[in-house]
Amino acid sequence: MTRTDPQADLFHTLARDGFAHVAAARMRSLFEAAGPLADLAEFTASWDDLGLDTYMADGGRYRKRRFGVFAAEADGPIVRMPHQPHYQSRDYNALNGGIERWFAPIAEAVGAGPSMRAILATCRSLFDRLAPGRAWHIEVHQFRIEARPGVAGRPTPEGMHRDGVDYVLVLLIRRENIRSGVTSIHDLEGHTLGSFTLAEPLAAALVDDHRVMHGVTPVEPEDPARPAFRDVLVVTFRDAR
């Protein structure tokens, strides 16, 4: 009997188009093939304990986050690295780049838990297929974008952009009382290749950062009397050589 390859269609889509929009049920099945999401409720709840991003050059106070760094040698395990700053050059982030940004670390239990392990293993398996033999520098970001009456939250305040890495996963964790938040994918000349909204927990966008740019429209509260936010996990893989 021929064994089904659970990543084959996603691999071919990314290789052909440079991006993929993956429905929540499909993404969940890929993660569960790598390991049980046994702590998913606790993993999701950890977004309630993020620190304010105080580096926003636009003066905004709508973004909260935590950050962690992992590494994987070719054919070696994924290991967490000592806490360190996040850095992007201004070539990739004209708004907030050019400085070391120190964020609160992702909690140890979250970083070592089964959900995070399954997510990282799934990404590593897929990206290894696209770029075999790499040693990876992996950065993981927990983001909460808050929206208030009259103050939209901006998931990508730097606009349509690349991250300066090889591959990116944007995974929706939760949407609460918001509208908009449309993800757009453009080629490097600025032509739109696709647009979609991550609407259900575990829906995802994956991008080849060398080939496409991505951005997300601001989010606004549906009911101004209630809290409104968009929680995502962003995972980037960059060749560590």
Image: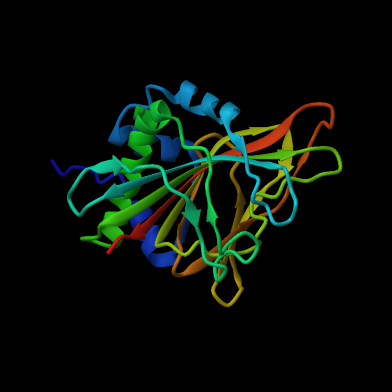
Residue 34 appears left or right of 201: left
Quadrant holding the C terminus = bottom left
Position of 51 relative to 168 (above/below): above
Query: Residue 175 in the image: x percent, y percent?
Result: 64, 34
Residue 141 appears left or right of 34: right
Residue 188 occupies which quadrant of the picture?
bottom right
Residue 179 appears left or right of 69: right
Count of numbered circles on the image: 0
Residue at image location 28% in from the left, 41% down from the top: 79
Query: Residue 171 in the image: x percent, y percent?
Result: 50, 43
Residue at image location 37% in from the left, 22% down from the top: 38
Position of 26 relative to 165 (above/below): above
- Furthest-right residue in this view: 150
- Furthest-bottom residue in this view: 189
Position of 195 relative to 107 (above/below): below
Query: Residue 72 in the image: x percent, y percent?
Result: 26, 49
Colouring method of the image: rainbow
Nearer to us in this view, 206 or 96: 96
Query: Residue 121 in the image: x percent, y percent?
Result: 30, 42
Nearer to us in this view, 163 or 32: 163
Quadrant holding the N terminus = top left
Residue 17 occupies which quadrant of the picture?
bottom left
Residue at image location 33% in from the left, 35% down from the top: 117
